[in-house]
Amino acid sequence: MDTPDPLFSLAGKTALVTGGANGIGLMIARGLTRRGVRTYLTGRDASRASARAEAIAREEGGACIGLAADFSTKDGPAALAAEIAAREPALHILVNNAGTNAPGDLAGMTEDDWDEVMAVNVRAPMFLVRELLPLLRAAARDDDPARIVNVGSIGGLHVPNWEAHPYGGSKAAIHHLTRSLAKALGKDRITVNAIAPGPFPSNMHDTTSEATRKSVATYIPLERAGEAEDAVGAVVFLASRAGAYIDGHVLPLDGGYIAAL
């Protein structure tokens, strides 16, 4: 287990990482567990989430617990919040990472596709925050607020060269929701920020494909895709004392892509 500078220490805290069984969520869940955070991760499949969490706990020497959560349903956020409340008196860190995608072209998308993307990517984080407020307030301190970190996307900061209407629209919405929640919850000593990743390896993004490698080399000044420590570093910063006075911001995690547009 790492023993970082106290300015970046998270030891002894409790976190929930939604969608933590895959991709960036898995990276974050592993990184938090490694740093002494009691970490809950979720996935739609209970057995897969449990297996991921058990592997993280074994490999990182910390506490990681997998739970099932389906954010495509209206009951998903409340059910998960009730499960966490039955296990924990307070929640220091909430990472709203669970997300989905759908065909993004105007001609091909269906209303069901649109509704599911908005439900998982926007509605669920909003109502999960509301349901978890008692636990977040219980963890909040004047000099060490409770933290909400939403996972947006560079797709919500610019319009790409391909059609991605539901995904881009949902991520732009989560960026705005980050700012509006920050304004509402500051009085409760709860900060709300977002990270906006560029290309990272995940089920939705194959960073090893020829098309992605070419895009990275062409458009990203650092000429590489994101890696696990890039995602973990951003969340650790925002969730630690080092980031305690940062509130209502969206941090592009993109190797310079947005800056170079």
Image: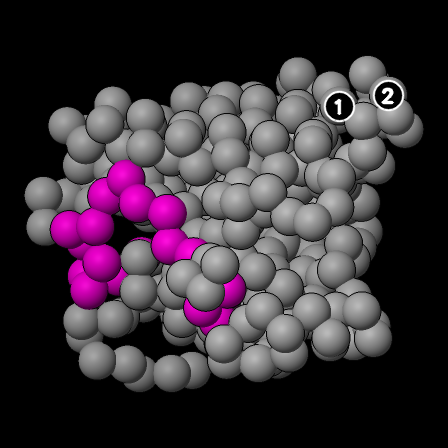
Along the line of sight, the residue nearer the viewer: 80 or 104: 104
Q: Up-down: is 119 above or below 223?
A: above
Which kind of residue does numbered mark 1 sit on? Trp
In this picture, residue 60 sits left or right of residue 208:
left
Instruction: Name the residue rendered at 66%, 16% in the picture.
Output: 74
**Label 1 neighbourhood size at 10 Å, few (<14), some (14-19), many (20+)?**
some
Q: Is residue 242 magenta?
A: yes
Question: Dot 2, how many residues are within 10 Å of its Cα: few (below 14), some (14-19), or many (20+)?
Answer: few
Residue 2 in magenta stretch? no
187 or 180, nearer to the observer: 180
Q: Assess whether mark 1 and mark 2 are in contact (beta carbons under 8 angstroms).
A: yes
Residue 152 in the image, given as x and y percentages of width and height: 52, 45
Of residues 158 and 94, the one drawn nearer to the viewer in this rendering: 158
Which corner quadrant of the image does residue 58 belong to?
A: bottom right
Which of the numbered marks, if any, corresponds to residue 110?
Answer: 2
Q: Is residue 50 visible?
A: no
Residue corresponding to mark 1 = 114
Name the residue type under label 2: Thr
Point out the stretch of residues depicted in magenta: 239-257
* Depth order, front residue of 28/59: 28
